[in-house]
Image (spheres, rainbow, N blue to C red):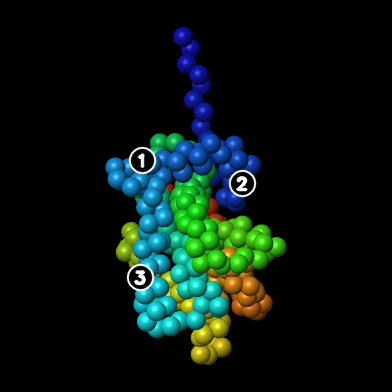
Amino acid sequence: MQLPAEQIIDSTRNRWLDLKETWRYRELFYFFTWRDIKIKYKQTVLGFLWAILQPLLMMAIFTFFFGRTLKIPSQEVPYPVYVFSGLLIWNIFSVGLTNAANSMVNNALIIKKIYFPRLIIPVSSILVALFDFVMAFILLIALFIYYQQPIQWTAVWYWPLALVVASLGTLGLGAWLAALNVKYRDFRYVIPFLVQVLFFLTPVLYPVSMLPHPLLKYVVACSPMYAAIELFRFPITGVAPVADLLAISLASGFILLIGGVLYFKFTEDFFADLA
């Protein structure tokens, strides 16, 4: 029997993002995403419920310290609803960024053996975070009902827009860190610290209006998660994002996305050797 000819794929033939090629490998998005979800909740008693319990416990802690003790304003919305809505978007970033940053190292064996668009791996890591969001969003609906929180239904289209902004911003920074982490393993220790710092620099627990100095507001707006959180909260609070701060946040997210993806593509030829 004659064996089929070996096919050699030159992975360096296109250093730019090839959407057509990525689409041809679209089944891998499902494979990597579902595999990571199963690994994440494997051998846990509560399983997928942890996607709800983790933000719920954080909401309870932050409500006690920031809502009850420090009396942080929440734009006329019950503080549990306010902080939980921010945590949902933030968790896309924190979970997605951490997973994406370590994704290339964690999949080193596959990278060395099989060719496919490498960007699929960090993107799939972010899809896992979106799965957690969908699970936790059910609890947010329950909070709306419990607190009788009115929703501006004409503005709910801001929710999917916020998800897109959060996902793309996470992908931008995640692609940077995924590529850097392959070459410099020190980044795996920097990432948790970076996430913690960005958490308090992003208006998850507080409205940006309470910041005492205008300069601080512009510093906060440099995070792409500012735009995502403000857009997501708009149908809940009825408070529209500040236009110039929103523009800064969206611009920073766009720069991160383009720069991160390009840096990832220009360095992916070395992943198999370094991972």
Q: In the rendered structure, which amino acid carries the disc numbered 2?
A: Asp
> Is residue 122 at least partly visible in the picture?
no
Q: 61 or 76: which is nearer to us?
A: 76
Alpha carbon separation for disc pair 2 and 1: 23 Å
The kind of residue on which mark 1 rests is: Leu
Q: Is residue 248 left or right of residue 101?
A: right
**Which residue is denoted by mark 2 in the rendering?**
18
Give the Cα separation between the discs numbered 2 and 3: 45 Å
- Residue that numbered label 1 is attached to: 109
| Picture coordinates of residue 115, whole percent (x, y) | 48, 38
Which residue corresponds to mark 3?
A: 61
**Label 3: how many residues lie within 10 Å, few (<14), some (14-19) or many (20+)?**
few
Secondary-structure class at tag 2 = loop
Work out whether residue 34 can be spotted. yes
* Residue type at tag 3: Ile
Q: Nearer the viewer, residue 46 or 29?
A: 46
Q: Position of residue 32 (x, y in %)?
A: 45, 42
